[in-house]
Amino acid sequence: MALVDLSVVEQRYRAVLAVLAGATVTEVAAEIGVSRQTVSSWVSRYRASGLAGLADRSRRPNSSPSQMAPQVEALVLELRRQHPRWGPVRLVHEAAKRGVVPPPSRMGVYRTLVRHGVIQPRTRRKRREEFIRWERPAAMDLWQMDIVGGIFLADGTEVKVVTGVDDHSRYCVIAAVVVRATGRAVCLAFAAALQRFGVPGEVLTDNGKQFTARFGTGGEVLYDRICRDNGIVHRLTEPRSPTTTGKVERFHQTLRRELLDDAAPFADVTTAQAAIDAWVGHYNHERPHQSLQMACPADRFTAAATVERELLPLRLPAALGSVDDAPAPAGGHLPAAAVAGDVADAASPR
């Protein structure tokens, strides 16, 4: 017989002997401070297995139907090895796409990654119950626009990207590389997107001088003139409030993490634009988005109807010139307004 902890077993044994000697289960349970069910269990285990039956038993179940199958665990680890930035939600989605039925749970995948040392366990803040995602109900209701820098060419030149995402679908409507983010360069990118997708109901930007004269003295800037001429409501964030344009800021984070952080300096502006166009095509049409319940932005985006565009033709200032010569995006998609090259640093006309 296996060795047991007699200090524990002896207490249980004495309780069992008391019951067998004629004491009631209720009396014995009250005397030693345990429940009646516990004492009854000890008596049954003693009758079935003798003294060994009173030893501590493992709480581990005989089977665990929810435990991840070895082949599924191997698939999850291999997907993570191939795509180090994929988290548990994306891995569950990809496992389901590969025919795993039922797919593993998000927490199951998380525990697998922790168990194999792929990620470190971390304490997550509890999500506020009153949290409500701010989102427009339909595509083309609102575009968020911004400018992101930190993209370098082989000769050391830093270029910028004028960006825009549709608030409802997260679809990228603008991703234009410019050497200098002047008011004219920003408006060329904006105008190209308006020609490609139609006119949104509203646009949301920060208070950059390319977008507004809110804190300047020069009067109406070109961007505001385009909005006014086409009936677009231009909304501005409050100063030092970057979370207001959270969707386009999150787009910047994804662009950096999935493309720019690992990319070598681009040979020139055209090369940089082609790389970003290709990535944006994947982002819009193939990459699942967690905030969209793993749908792709293109699944929720619809450009303005042709009838609407014919009834209200796009109006662009003569000073802006034509945007018809802007190169088409790479990859055959329609994700970005490609306005490349060095744009003259001219003041925006009133």
Image: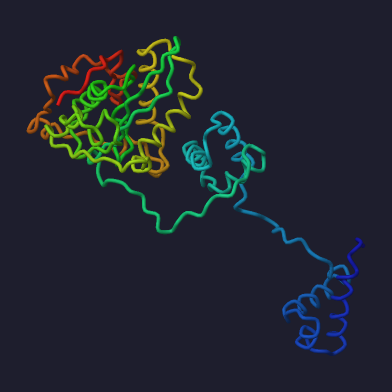
Q: Is 288 on the left-hand or right-hand side of 137?
A: right
Residue 149 on image: x %, y %: 40, 25
Tell which of 180 and 170 is nearer to you: 180
Residue 295 on image: x %, y %: 37, 40
Compared with 84, 159 (above or below) is: above
Tell which of 145 and 307 is nearer to you: 145
Tell which of 204 and 12 is nearer to you: 204
Name the residue at 36% across, 13% down. 269
Compared with 122, 225 (above or below) is: above
Q: Is 173 on the left-hand or right-hand side of 77?
A: left
Tell which of 133 and 109 is nearer to you: 133
Name the residue at 37% across, 40% down. 242
Which quarter of the figure has residue 29? Answer: bottom right
Name the residue at 48% across, 29% down. 257
Name the residue at 27% across, 23% down. 337
**Furthest residue toward front:** 217
Which quarter of the figure has residue 250? Answer: top left
**Furthest residue toward left:** 311
Quarter placement of the N terminus: bottom right
Q: Is 247 on the left-hand or right-hand side of 347?
A: right
